[in-house]
Amino acid sequence: MDEARDFEEFAGDAARRLFHVAYLMCGDWHRAQDLVQTTLAKMYAVWGRLRQGGDEPTLDAYARKVLLRTYLSQRRLRRESEIVVAEPGDYAPAAGRSGSPELRLTLIAALRQLPPRNRAVVVLRYLDDHSLEDTAEILGCSLGAVKSLSSRSLGKLREILGEDREVLFRD
């Protein structure tokens, strides 16, 4: 299989997963699509090197790291001036996700109130189900920093959600 087809296959498989993480981090369909496209473009630029030493889980981890760093760098540059006017695109929530749309919107609104790194920790740890170690590696920080950010972020979410948290987090 040539490199271009190999990348297209990877991008097709990874796009929905990356979009889910991007959307939860930024809370905006179009910005999430832009983040995924930027991530995939950055990966395509170095695809030959990545493919030589990477298996699928390593490529997924690298893609998430690129996505997160792109998101955080855009936040630092204050690219928040875009006005979104169109409807969401092709990225519907994955089948099997529980909860009503209203609850998802409540959670996303609460996530948007967290600072970017805190939001990234919550998304990676609790919504994308990464371990503490994986989250620390993706964020490029220590395990203690992830624990601290997790604790503070969950406390802030509890404060923001108030009574809604019981509905969101019940089994």
Image: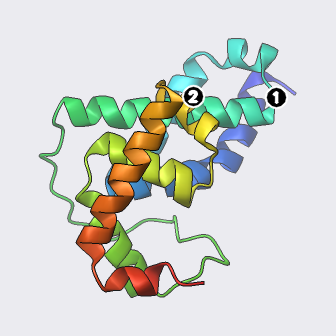
Q: Of marks 2 and 1, which one's residue comes earlier in the chain?
A: 1
Q: Quadrant of the C terminus?
A: bottom right
Mark sitting on residue 137: 2
Image position, residue 68 (x, y; %): 44, 36
| Residue drawn where x is 50% and y is 24% of the image | 42
Residue 163 placement, left or right of 64? left
SS category of the residue bearing label 2? helix
Instruction: Give the image location of residue 152, x and y in percent.
Output: 33, 51
**For this view, does 23 lie left or right of residue 125?**
left
Distance in Å between CA atoms under marks 2 and 1: 17 Å
Q: Is residue 122 above or below residue 135?
A: below
Q: Secondary structure at mark 1?
A: loop
Please tell me which residue is depicted at 42% across the width and 56% down the height of the picture.
Answer: 23
Amino acid residing under circle 1 = Asp
Instruction: Establish if 93 lies above or below 73.
Output: below
Eye-nearest disc, 2 or 1: 2
| Residue 100 appears in view | yes
Tag 2: amino acid: Glu
Q: Which residue is mark 1?
A: 55
Residue 77 falls in image quadrant: top left
- Can residue 28 be seen by looking at this rendering? no
Please tell me in which quadrant of the rendered image residue 8 appears: top right
- Report the residue at 44% width, 46% height from top: 121
- Give x and y (percent) for residue 36: 48, 43
